[in-house]
């Protein structure tokens, strides 16, 4: 199924944050959102699963630790259902309105968690992602890469959800999966060393985003960022 390029054209800029648990996604998304606010650039901050009203119901199913019986395929399809709703209700309208959209996880998480780690196949998840997203992929996917042990140490104060409760061998596979995917799509997916200090990561992401917006859009968004 070929995406309809015309329907997917937009003046905004689409960024996803990916990576393992505790890598610093929420932290860095807060910093980047503030950076856009400071430049008076409209930004929509969202997440998966659960970026829409319907999605938040799907999120409850997916992350409830009691749902140990959920099969891998059912898990994948729930993530995809959430994503389809997310694209039509939230992401695409915001991009078409010229906004920056930052999402905490998107299609690459399904490729890694379900395609690679659950063994459903990368080819299969990529094809299903094409269907669920109408072919809409981030202009820039930022993978925060961190050794699993460090991620666990950073998560120790929180109550873990169903995915976070997976064994460390699973989380190691997740880490390797994101690195594998970034080698396959070296331009769209950028890996950042998340073991650096919070501020070092913040600056690296800011430089990367500035560069990409300057190169890929060169329009009103960049004019605002230049200031
Ligand atoms: N670069 C960093 N160095 C040390 N601790 C960090 C860093 N980035 C985030 N943290 C802390 O690690 C924990 C997990 O970060 P969080 O942003 O919630 O990760 P994620 O959203 O990827 O699961 C938080 O307590 C956060 O303050
Ligand atoms: Mg988070």
Image: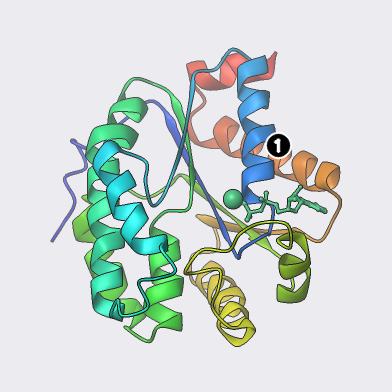
| Residue 62 percent coordinates (x, y) | 36, 62
| Residue 211 percent coordinates (x, y) | 65, 37
Is there any visible trace of residue 133 in the rendered image? no
Indicate whether 192 appears above or below 67.
Answer: above
Give the structural element (helix, strand or loop) at label 1: helix
Q: Residue at x 72, y 69 (%)?
A: 152
Indicate whether 173 appears above or below 109.
Answer: below
| Residue 109 percent coordinates (x, y) | 45, 63
Q: Residue at x 72, y 66 (%)?
A: 151
Q: Residue at x 30, y 76 (%)?
A: 70
Instruction: Report if the beta carbon of the residue with label 1 is closer than 8 angstroms to ligand 1.
Output: no
Indicate whether 26 appears above or below 149.
Answer: above
Q: Nearer the viewer, residue 50 or 211?
A: 50
Indicate whether 222 appears above or below 176.
Answer: above
Q: Residues within 10 Å of mark 1 (few under 14, many from 20)?
A: some
The scheme the figure's colours follow is rainbow
């Amino acid at each position: 199924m070929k995406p309809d390029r015309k329907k997917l054209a937009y003046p905004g800029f689409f960024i996803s944050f990916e990576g393992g648990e505790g890598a610093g996604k929420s932290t860095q998304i807060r910093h980047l959102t503030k950076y856009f606010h400071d430049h008076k650039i409209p930004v929509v901050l969202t997440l998966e699963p659960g970026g829409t009203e319907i999605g938040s119901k799907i999120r409850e199913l997916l992350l409830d630790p009691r749902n140990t019986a959920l099969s891998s395929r059912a898990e994948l399809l729930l993530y995809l259902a959430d994503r389809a709703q997310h694209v039509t209700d939230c992401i695409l309208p915001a991009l078409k309105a010229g906004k920056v959209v930052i999402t905490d996880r998107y299609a690459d998480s399904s490729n890694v968690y379900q395609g690679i780690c659950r063994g459903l196949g990368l080819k299969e998840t990529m094809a299903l992602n094409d269907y669920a997203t109408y072919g809409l992929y981030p202009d820039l996917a930022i993978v925060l890469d961190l050794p699993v042990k460090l991620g666990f140490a950073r998560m120790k104060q929180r109550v873990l959800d169903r995915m976070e409760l997976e064994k460390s061998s699973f989380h190691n596979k997740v880490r390797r999966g994101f690195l594998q995917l970034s080698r396959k799509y070296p331009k769209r997916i950028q890996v950042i060393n998340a073991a650096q200090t919070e501020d070092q990561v913040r600056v690296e992401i800011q430089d990367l985003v500035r560069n990409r917006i300057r190169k890929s859009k060169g329009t009103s968004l960049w004019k605002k960022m230049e200031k």
